[in-house]
Amino acid sequence: MISRTKQYILLAASAFMLSTATFAQDTAESSGSENSKEAKGDKYYEDYAFMDAREAYIKAVDNGYRSANLLSKLADSYYYNGEYEEASKWYGALFSFSEEIDSEYVYRYAQSLKSIVKYATADRVMKRLNEVAKEDDRGALFKEEPDYLKSIELQSGRFNIFPVPFNSEYSDYGPTLNTGALIFTSNRKTRTASQHFHDWDDQPFSELYSIL
């Protein structure tokens, strides 16, 4: 007959093995779920549906999952939409996650930082670009002209920019005069139910407008 002590030991060992197996299964399922979210985001990204891709990537990140592929594309989803504050945040996360980064992401990180007026940090990133990709002309150009801000300052103040009454909160561009009318392109929102929105940025498609 098995002694009571041995029974306790066997029960404890069985419980431990069961909990370990359950934990391993849960971990595998969780990892698979986050990989699935990344794959879903990649599919959206390949279709230039950056807003949907971003949503899938963020869900994976919120659950503790990260990869170089995910971080780079998540950052791109902001970069391609001119949201440079968030872009710089995720490019920075990519830098912290991996030491081997494609030179294009190094450059985009620097550009994002410049766009939010973090010039000193951007300059350090550009120096790294020149170190890791000496064949990249952009890094070489920065090395030749490290005082680019002075050149920009010399050109400032030459033009005045101000809004006009028909400007919108979206993109208004390409003005031209035609028989007394000003023709321009805009992706402003209209009240028509037929207006289409682009998967790239969830903003309306551009249309032509005229002002007499």
Image (cartoon, rainbow, N blue to C red):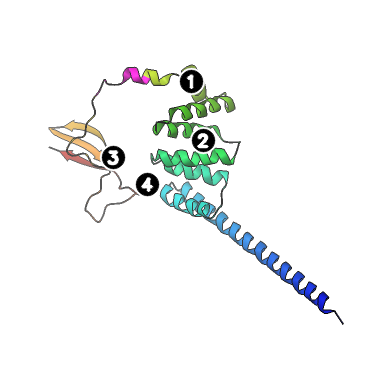
Q: Nearer the viewer, residue 30 or 38?
A: 30
Labels 1 & 4 near each other (Cβ < 8 A): no
In 3D space, how far apart are the residues under numbered discs 4 and 2 (Cα atoms)? 20 Å
Label 1 sits on residue: 141
Left or right, residue 69 beside residue 84: right
Position of the N terminus by quadrant: bottom right
Q: Nearer the viewer, residue 191 or 113?
A: 113
Labels 4 & 2 near each other (Cβ < 8 A): no
Tell me residue 154's x, y (percent).
33, 17
In 3D space, how far apart are the residues under numbered discs 1 and 2 (Cα atoms)? 17 Å
Label 3 sits on residue: 171
Which numbered disc, 1 or 2, marks the residue that appears first in the sequence? 2
In 3D space, how far apart are the residues under numbered discs 1 and 4 (Cα atoms)? 32 Å
Labels 4 & 3 near each other (Cβ < 8 A): no
Residue at 22% in and 37% down = 184
Q: For mark 4, give the secondary structure.
A: loop
Which numbered disc, 4 or 3, marks the residue that appears first in the sequence? 3
Q: Amino acid at mark 2?
A: Tyr
71 to 134, vertically: above or below: below
Tell me residue 91's x, y (percent).
50, 39
18 to 90, vertically: above or below: below
Left or right, residue 151 beside residue 33: left
Q: Amino acid at mark 1?
A: Leu
Q: Amino acid at mark 3?
A: Ser
Tell me residue 163's x, y (percent).
21, 34
Position of the C terminus by quadrant: top left
Label 4 sits on residue: 201
Which numbered disc, 1 or 4, marks the residue that appears first in the sequence? 1
Q: Which residues are magenta?
A: 152-159
